[in-house]
Image (spheres, rainbow, N blue to C red):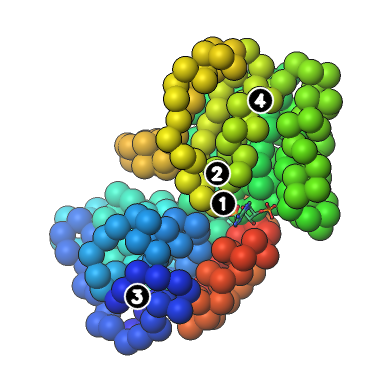
Amino acid sequence: MKAVRIHEFGGPEVLSYEDIEVPEPGPGQARVKLAASGVNFIDVYQRTGQYPGDLPRPLGLEGAGEVDAVGEGVEDLSVGDYVAFASAPGSYAEYVVAPAENLVPFNVTLVEARVAAAVMLQGITAHYLTHSTFPLEEGQTALVHAAAGGVGLLLVQIAKLRGATVIGTAGTEEKAQLAREAGADEVILYTEQDFVEETNRITGGEGVHVVYDSVGKDTFDGGLDVLRQRGYMVLFGASSGPVPPFDPQILNQKGGLFLTRPSIGHYTATREELLWRAESLFSWIGQGNLNVRIGGTYELSDAEQAHRDLEGRKTTGKLLLIP
Ligand code: NDP
């Protein structure tokens, strides 16, 4: 089968499209014939070695497709079921094998396979950020950075479903428009405007209850300045680079703030939690309450271009690879 792997860490050019053996499912595992694989920033961190791992390394974690073989002891899944997942290493491929407990069944007549692939990692992230890390309540205000990105567009919509006021940031006017269409009440063009000044102006100097920051280095310090007293800095990514070492005393000086740096694994720790989040997303999609924007579709052999576009800040919504 065809798959994308790396044999060394580096730029997008190290992504190698090659032939490897179709994997066989072991006990408790299932094999999925992929309809689509999701591209995520974590794949970039794995490619560059920022998140280390053994080489050669198959890339990709997310996708959806049809179960075509099951290993010993798998009772809840059958050949022909459609499943989606956010944590099956090696999903940039025609087939992937994963523990059955990581696979979420979905009804392919209600949710298209590509949409299911597109929503798993970024959608579950948006879900846990708004429901568990800082459970947003009606009347609260959130600042969402990179609001037209993959996580961003979902985060804006889900924050609105919870009744919050949402201020988004975006790098271009086109992206700002997408964030508005997703429901953002205000959007700041942070490449042209000072988002600290703008957020303080919009909130009448009160500040926001929570900052959801996936951008990291370029936005972290400013985010601390727009939080109201005892506000939450939820730092969940580093698209502009990692935040340098930080003195906790700053949290005191800026108003008894909270800081957390969560990952999806912390919030899908049990099968129940994974199913709760994924099924909530599928049900919102089925009811027309959540729009999943697929901003780019690439052949599996074009994974290199997909990475260039994602890192080059050129994309909106979700990028998919089609095997
Ligand atoms: P996005 O679609 O959000 O793409 C990244 C966006 O970040 C860009 O489009 C750009 O939007 C913005 N950005 C700002 N500065 C830069 C820069 N210097 N270089 C590149 N992009 C920049 O990606 P994802 O939705 O896949 O992921 C967003 C972030 O969330 C990533 O950092 C990722 O690691 C993190 N993440 C964390 C998870 C967790 O559980 N902790 C799970 C999923 C994602 P603009 O032009 O509008 O500024």
- Assign a secondary structure to mark 2: loop
Task: Kindly identify which residue carries mark 3.
Answer: 5
Extreme bottom residue here? Answer: 19
Q: How many residues crowd mark 3 within 10 Å: few (<14), some (14–19), many (20+)?
A: many
Dot placed on the residue nearer the N-terminal end, 2 or 3: 3
Q: Nearer the viewer, residue 190 or 112?
A: 190
Against 296, is 257 above or below?
above
From the Cβ of disc 1, is ligand 1 less than 8 Å away? Answer: yes
- Assign a secondary structure to mark 4: helix
Residue 178 visible, this angle: no
Task: Kindly identify which residue carries mark 1.
Answer: 240
| Snapshot quadrant of residue 30 | bottom left
Name the amino acid type tagged 3: Arg
Could you tell me residue 269's position as x and y percent?
A: 33, 37
Residue at mark 2 to residue at mark 3: CA–CA distance: 29 Å
Residue drawn where x is 77% and y is 38% of the image: 194
Task: Kindly identify which residue carries mark 2.
Answer: 217
Residue at mark 4 to residue at mark 2: CA–CA distance: 14 Å
In-image side of 18 versus 175 (left or right): left
From the Cβ of disc 2, is ligand 1 less than 8 Å away? Answer: yes
Dot placed on the residue nearer the N-terminal end, 3 or 4: 3
Residue at mark 1 to residue at mark 2: CA–CA distance: 6 Å
Task: Kindly identify which residue carries mark 4.
Answer: 225
Name the amino acid type tagged 1: Ser
Q: Nearer the viewer, residue 310 or 281?
A: 310
Residue 220 visible, this angle: yes
Against 88, is 180 above or below?
above
Labelled pair 1, 2 in contact (Cβ < 8 Å): yes
Q: Say which of marks 3 and 1 sits in front.
A: 1
